Every structure is written in structure tokens, then in C-alpha cells.
Amino acid sequence: MLRLKKHISFADKAVDVLIYAGLFLIAVTTLYPFVNILAISLNDAIDSIRGGIYLWPRRFTLLNYQSVFSYPQILSAFNMSVLRTVVGTTFGVFSTFMVAYTISRKDFIARKFTTFIFLLTMYFSGGLIPEFFLIRSLGLMNNFWVYIFPGLISAWNLIVMRSFIEGLPDSLQESAKIDGANDLVIAFRIIMPLCMPVIATISLFVAVGQWNSWFDTFIYAGANDALNTLQFELMRILQNTATSMSPDAFRRGDILEASIVTPEAIRATITIVATAPILFVYPFIQKYFVKGITLGAVKN
């Protein structure tokens, strides 16, 4: 059988070259800041002040990382962040799925009103002070559950998951009802397995939010050191380093401490320490990420 070769015109080749060049430029622009920060974190702190560090360290050292991990509470804070991320993601995604499945049902009378209530939270907020009084009245101050309950369901994640569920064929639920399945069986045996792409996507959103959060620790759990998260401890390390490099520190003669690390080096090191765990998790759910976003936005 003869195969006809498709003729590619010069214009098509030029367009392909421009597309690949644009994608390469975007990739370089995206990766370079992270590689640069990694190089600074692995470079001697005093040498970094001279500048000129781009893709690799000029004077390799691990003193910056040793300085960060030498803090006594860093390990317990890391464990607390992992616990918070796992529990918060599990509860958040499960609650979001249950509400999304409920408001996606056309036979649910209050589906429009419930959706409207959640949408209001995207545009209006009571503010920090009313939220503080609410948290205190609920008895969540210096309590682990203050990390979980206040932000249990995000309106944006809820709408994405609801749109995904509404895009599934109605015949799946109808056939299950004919076979005698109740709502719980339909939700967990039929709908949830089909929602794995969007569940993985929202899990990433929730996990990143839980992992990066530190302000709620400062406001609601600052009196309990056992609840300090990794981000909160890294923020304190950065503040302590900035204080040690102040003019007063040099006048006091703290030259040894100031010569080991600098705020810029610690800031780069903290960025790598805070980002690395999420980067290791992302490849495992990358295949679901794009599919979960795009399919949830298109209805047949």
C-alpha cells in the first residue's frame, strides 16, 4: 500500500518553530527563578552578597540549610504541617464532594439557594476581627481544629467539582436507581470513582493552601508551641536572621553569627524547604491535573 506523504508548507514550519520557541521561552522563564533561588541557597551567604549567581552556586556550602534545620522546633513544626495538610485535605475534599454532589442533583429543591450562599463567600467576607471573635466563641483558639474547620470548603473548589459532576451522563444515576441503589451508593460507588481527576486536582489546591498557610497559626494558635507549623517557624527564622544582621548586631559584636548567614540566603533556603515537599507530590497527580480542570468546565 502506498503512503502519501503530507506536504508541509514553509508557513506551517515557521508557525511550528514559533510555537516551540514560545513554549521554550515560557519554560525557561518559569524554571529560572526556582533554579536561581536553589543556587543562592547552596552558595556561601557572604559571597552571595556580591551577586552574579545565576544557575549554580559559586562557593558551594550547606551552612544555610544547617542554620535552618538547627532550630529545635523545626522537626515538630514539619510534622505538624504534614498532619495539618493530610487531615485538612482529607476533610476538605470529602466535604466539598458531598456538597457538590448534593447541589448537582436536579431533584434537590434548595440547590440554587445553597449555591448562591456559597457564591456569596467568594465576594464578601466579615473581616479579620469578626472572624477572630467567631473562632474564639467556638472554642477553637489554640486548638488543632482551627486549621481545619474555618476553611473546610472553598466556594471555588465547590463550583469546579459541581460542574464536573453535572458533566457526567444522567443515565448513570438513573440506571443505578433502577437497580435499587440509594443516594450514598450512587455517590460513593458510581460518582466518586468517575470524579478522581477533579478530586486529585482539588486535593492539590487544598494541600498547597494548607501547607503554605502560616497566618492562622500566628493569629489563632500562637500561644501553643505544639501547633506551630513549618511555615510559621520558617517565618520566625527569617525574622531572627534579619535581626542578627541589623546594625545593632554589628555594634554588639555579633560578627560570627552575622557572617554565617544573611537574610537573603536564609530567604532562598526557606523558599526551597517550603516548596520541595509540594514539588515531590505534584508529579504523582499531574496526569489528573489538566483533565480535572478542563472536564469540569465543559458540559455536554
Image (cartoon, rainbow, N blue to C red):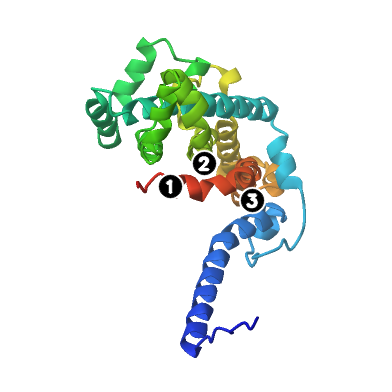
Q: Nearer the viewer, mark 3 or mark 2?
A: 2
For residue 243, say whether it is visible: yes
Tell me where residue 150 sits by quadrant.
top left
Crowd class of label 1 (few under 14; some 14 to 19; many from 20; radius 10 Å): some
Could you say whether the residue bearing mark 2 is in a helix, strand or loop? helix
Location of mark 2 (residue): 197
Residue 34: x and y in percent read: 60, 56
Residue 112: x and y in percent read: 23, 29
Amino acid type, label 1: Leu
Q: Nearer the viewer, residue 240 or 64?
A: 64
Whether tag 1 and tag 3 are in contact, CB under 8 A, the answer is: no
Whether tag 1 and tag 2 are in contact, CB under 8 A, the answer is: yes
For residue 251, say whether it is visible: no
Location of mark 3 (residue): 265
Nearest to N terminus: mark 1 or mark 2: 2
Q: Nearer the viewer, mark 1 or mark 3?
A: 1
Q: Nearer the viewer, residue 224 or 88?
A: 88
User: CA–CA distance between discs 3 and 2?
Assistant: 38 Å
Crowd class of label 3 (few under 14; some 14 to 19; many from 20; radius 10 Å): many
**Point 55% across, 83% down: residue:** 6
Could you say whether the residue bearing mark 3 is in a helix, strand or loop? helix
Could you say whether the residue bearing mark 1 is in a helix, strand or loop? helix
User: CA–CA distance between discs 1 and 3?
Assistant: 42 Å
Amino acid type, label 2: Pro
Report the disc number at residue 195: none
Location of mark 1 (residue): 295
Nearest to N terminus: mark 3 or mark 2: 2
